[in-house]
């Protein structure tokens, strides 16, 4: 089978440190090169991973040998360059959030559908095996009847020039860590999940620094989410059942060498449940590969992206 030739728009840290090591492991992809508006920034990529340095994003997109692109640009640039990539007949693996609003997301999805191109939103944690284990435990009845989900993702203030604090670049806690909590809530509650109430706080910044929300599905099951980028670090799912509580203390950011251990707490004490290690970045890339090669998964992915961006827009 012909390999999928892939290029990268932008020389971000996540592309260098996380994406390319994972991509290099995947036998279905061939890394072609990376584009930057400053060609000097491509040199560390070429020295470490090989490939071509493109002097502009447009130059890379004009390369007809490239089948797919990874876009790790700041969120405000996702629509512009996602649209140009799709119009250049490239499959698109987009860093989250897919776009900064539902309207732009729908435009990109419509283009992808018309051209039968794959698009994938890179919420890597969704493809870590701990989520399947968590779902199995919930479905087994071990926790009893589920009463509530609590989901939290927050981290301390980063440097002042970080794009997350820049409104013009699509910054804000909701579009960053908040999206993770909404994605997990949707996974647990299902497609009928709706925002009941929410709160975003900016504290004299141009963007929201932290926030919270209550989400409910048609069965009355509730998830409470909290997120922030000027908070103490927290990365946790807590499932409250009638018989026991399940905790996943590293639900979003487990590195590929990190042994995930869940905690099940009941009247008899704490049971440690080992999940082991997993490479969620590789698994997300693999999901992109499946989307490219499987029409059913392709259309399912369109709907998942639209639902996620609708929830973000609603909050």
Image: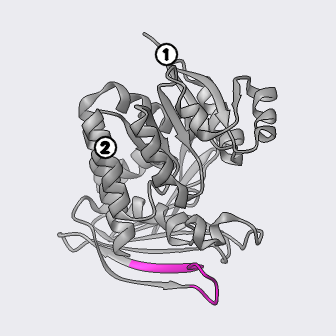
Q: Does residue 138 appear in this view?
A: no
Q: Which residue is mark 2?
A: 111
Q: Is residue 59 above or below residue 154?
A: above
**Where on the picture, by quarter, is residue 208?**
bottom right
N-terminal of the pair, mark 2 or mark 1, is 1
Q: Residue at x 52, y 35 (%)?
A: 69
If the image is split into quadrants, where does the C terminus sit? bottom left
Q: Nearer the viewer, residue 277 or 40?
A: 40
Magenta region, residue range? 202-213
Q: Does residue 43 appear in this view?
A: yes
Q: Is residue 191 left or right of residue 142?
A: left
Q: Nearer the viewer, residue 217 or 23?
A: 23
**Where on the picture, by quarter, is residue 57?**
top right
Is label 2 in a helix, a strand or a loop?
A: helix
Query: Could you tell me if the residues under marks 2 and 1 are in contact, i.e. CB atoms within 8 Å?
Result: no
If the image is split into quadrants, where does the N terminus sit? top left
Where residue 256 sits: x, y (%)? 63, 39
Query: Which residue sits furthest bottom?
Result: 204
Q: Nearer the viewer, residue 121 or 141?
A: 121
How dense is the environment of label 1, judged by Cα within 10 Å: few (below 14), some, or many (20 and up)? few
- Residue 115 forms part of the magenta stretch: no
Where residue 213 sits: x, y (%)? 41, 79
Q: How many marks?
A: 2
Q: Nearer the viewer, residue 79 or 153?
A: 79
| The disc label shown at residue 3, or none | 1
């Amino acid at each position: 089978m012909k390999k999928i030739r892939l290029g990268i728009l932008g020389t971000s840290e996540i592309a260098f440190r996380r994406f390319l090591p994972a991509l290099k492991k995947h036998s279905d992809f061939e890394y072609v090169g990376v584009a930057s508006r400053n060609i000097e920034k491509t040199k560390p990529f070429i020295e470490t991973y090989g490939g071509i340095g493109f002097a502009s994003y447009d130059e890379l997109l004009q390369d007809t040998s490239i089948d797919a692109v990874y876009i790790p640009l700041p969120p405000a640039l996702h629509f512009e360059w996602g649209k140009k990539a799709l119009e250049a007949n490239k499959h698109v693996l987009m860093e989250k959030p897919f776009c900064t609003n539902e309207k732009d997301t729908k435009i990109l999805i419509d283009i992808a559908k018309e051209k039968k191109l794959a698009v994938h939103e890179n919420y890597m944690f969704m493809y870590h095996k701990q989520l399947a284990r968590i779902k199995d435990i919930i479905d087994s009845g071990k926790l009893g009847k589920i009463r509530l989900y609590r989901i939290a993702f927050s981290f301390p203030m980063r440097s002042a020039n970080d794009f997350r604090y820049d409104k013009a670049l699509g910054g804000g806690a909701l579009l960053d860590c908040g999206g993770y909590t909404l994605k997990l809530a949707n996974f647990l509650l299902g497609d009928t999940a709706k925002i009941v109430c929410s709160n975003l706080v900016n504290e004299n910044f141009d963007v929201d620094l932290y926030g919270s929300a209550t989400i409910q599905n048609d069965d009355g099951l509730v998830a409470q989410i909290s997120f922030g980028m000027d908070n103490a670090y927290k990365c946790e799912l807590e499932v409250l059942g009638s018989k026991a509580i399940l905790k996943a203390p590293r639900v979003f950011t487990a590195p590929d060498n990190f042994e995930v251990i869940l905690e099940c707490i009941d009247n008899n004490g704490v049971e440690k449940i080992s999940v082991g290690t997993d490479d969620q970045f590789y698994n997300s890339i693999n999901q992109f590969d499946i989307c490219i090669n499987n029409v059913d998964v392709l259309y399912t992915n369109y709907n998942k992206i639209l639902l996620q961006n609708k929830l973000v827009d609603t909050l």
